[in-house]
Image (cartoon, rainbow, N blue to C red):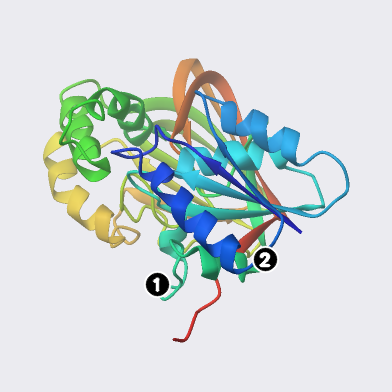
């Protein structure tokens, strides 16, 4: 198997992904094997690289070295290829997808990653884009969209940039008028109303550590859907801390479902955020693709 490290120097701060290069070279000097690393040149280049590296039938392991957005690009570029396994070195500002996994796994170790085991995981299809973690509409998506501006500040880490963007959006119009259809496999549920947050989740954490979908499991073949009614700004202030800890599901204005598909329709374009990457549309379909990607869990190394 060939090991390919796709390094995004723009992820996180201080070009952290590039710091992996001497560790990669040192490992393969001691443990000869087929490897290569590629440094991305701009937005969507990780997707293009992943598509190119996954061509053919030879087994390949693609390591996304960046943040959740880099991981999503590598997934998009290689999705549907049976010869591909995907690994992840967390070099971004949030790295939320792996927070739902065993805390004892060392995702920063080249040795543990190369010796790691691929497991089948669910993928969310979001209007053709592929997501491993969480897709959202509403305040959180608007915050993610605005977060890019705050990340340019020298001291604004992922959580700090998120909180600054949240404070900014807090004083703008809250809530989106949406028509929502949820398909559970056995029945179809229709809703119409104004929602401050709408989540289709495969992982539990997003936004730099907010536990928006605390019951989500990355390989159960189901979407965790969370709808949160628009509430007053005073209630939001009390709600945010509970939301971050994942203690919000029992609140009366929070509605939780397990399903296979959710379709959302809006009268005007809304921002959708899929694993940190934002786009706009009026109609969005989120559909679970069970066990459709192979994700590498690092081996626990006992010294």
Mark pair 1, 2: CA separation: 17 Å
Q: How many marks?
A: 2
Q: Residue furthest front?
A: 29
Q: Is residue 4 above or below residue 190?
A: below
Sooner in the amino-acid sequence: mark 1 or mark 2: 1
- Where residue 217 appears, x then y in whole percent? 54, 64
Can residue 118 be seen here? yes
Which residue does the image show at 67% across and 38% down from the upper left?
50
Q: Which residue is mark 1?
A: 103
User: How many other residues sit within 10 Å of disc 1, few (<14), some (14-19) or many (≥20)?
Assistant: few
Can residue 217 be seen here? no
- Where residue 98 appears, x then y in whole percent? 46, 59
Q: Hey, which quadrant is residue 61 in on the image? A: bottom right
Q: Is residue 297 above or below residue 86?
A: below
Check the picture and name the quadrant holding the C terminus.
Answer: bottom left
Pick the front one: 24 or 199? 24
Q: Cβ–Cβ below 8 Å for labels 1 and 2?
A: no
Q: Which mark is residue 12?
A: none
Q: Which residue is mark 2?
A: 118
Q: Residue furthest top?
A: 268
Which residue does the image show at 45% across and 52% down from the upper left?
22
User: How many other residues sit within 10 Å of disc 2, few (<14), some (14-19) or many (≥20)?
Assistant: some
Considering the numbered disc 2 on the image, is that residue within a helix, a strand or a loop? strand
Which residue does the image show at 22% across and 30% down from the upper left?
165
Which residue does the image show at 80% across and 46% down from the upper left?
81
């Amino acid at each position: 198997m060939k090991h390919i490290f796709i390094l995004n120097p723009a992820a996180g701060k201080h070009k952290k992904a590039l710091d992996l290069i001497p560790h990669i070279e040192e490992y393969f000097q001691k443990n000869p094997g087929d490897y290569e690393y590629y440094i991305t040149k701009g937005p969507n280049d990780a997707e293009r690289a992943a598509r190119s590296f996954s061509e053919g039938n030879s087994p390949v392991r693609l390591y996304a070295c960046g943040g959740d957005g880099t991981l999503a690009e590598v997934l998009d570029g290689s999705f549907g290829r049976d010869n591909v396994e995907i690994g992840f070195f967390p070099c971004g500002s949030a790295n939320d997808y792996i927070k739902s996994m065993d805390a004892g796994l060392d995702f920063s170790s080249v040795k543990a990653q190369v010796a790691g085991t691929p497991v089948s995981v669910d993928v969310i299809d979001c209007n053709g884009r592929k997501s491993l973690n969480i897709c959202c509409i509403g305040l959180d998506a608007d915050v993610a969209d605005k977060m890019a501006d705050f990340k340019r500040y020298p001291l604004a880490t992922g959580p700090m940039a998120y909180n600054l963007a949240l404070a900014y959006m807090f004083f703008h119009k809250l809530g989106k008028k949406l028509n929502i259809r949820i398909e559970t496999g056995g029945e179809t549920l229709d809703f119409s109303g104004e929602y401050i947050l709408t989540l289709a989740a495969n992982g539990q954490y997003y936004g730099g550590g907010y536990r928006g979908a605390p019951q989500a499991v990355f390989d159960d073949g189901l979407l965790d859907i969370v709808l949160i009614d628009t509430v007053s700004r005073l209630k939001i202030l009390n709600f945010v801390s509970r939301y971050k800890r994942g203690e919000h599901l029992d609140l009366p204005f929070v509605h939780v479902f397990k399903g296979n598909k959710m379709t959302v329709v809006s009268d005007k374009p809304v921002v959708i955020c899929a694993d940190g990457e934002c786009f706009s549309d009026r109609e969005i379909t989120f559909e679970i693709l069970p066990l459709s990607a192979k994700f590498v869990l690092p081996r626990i190394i006992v010294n």
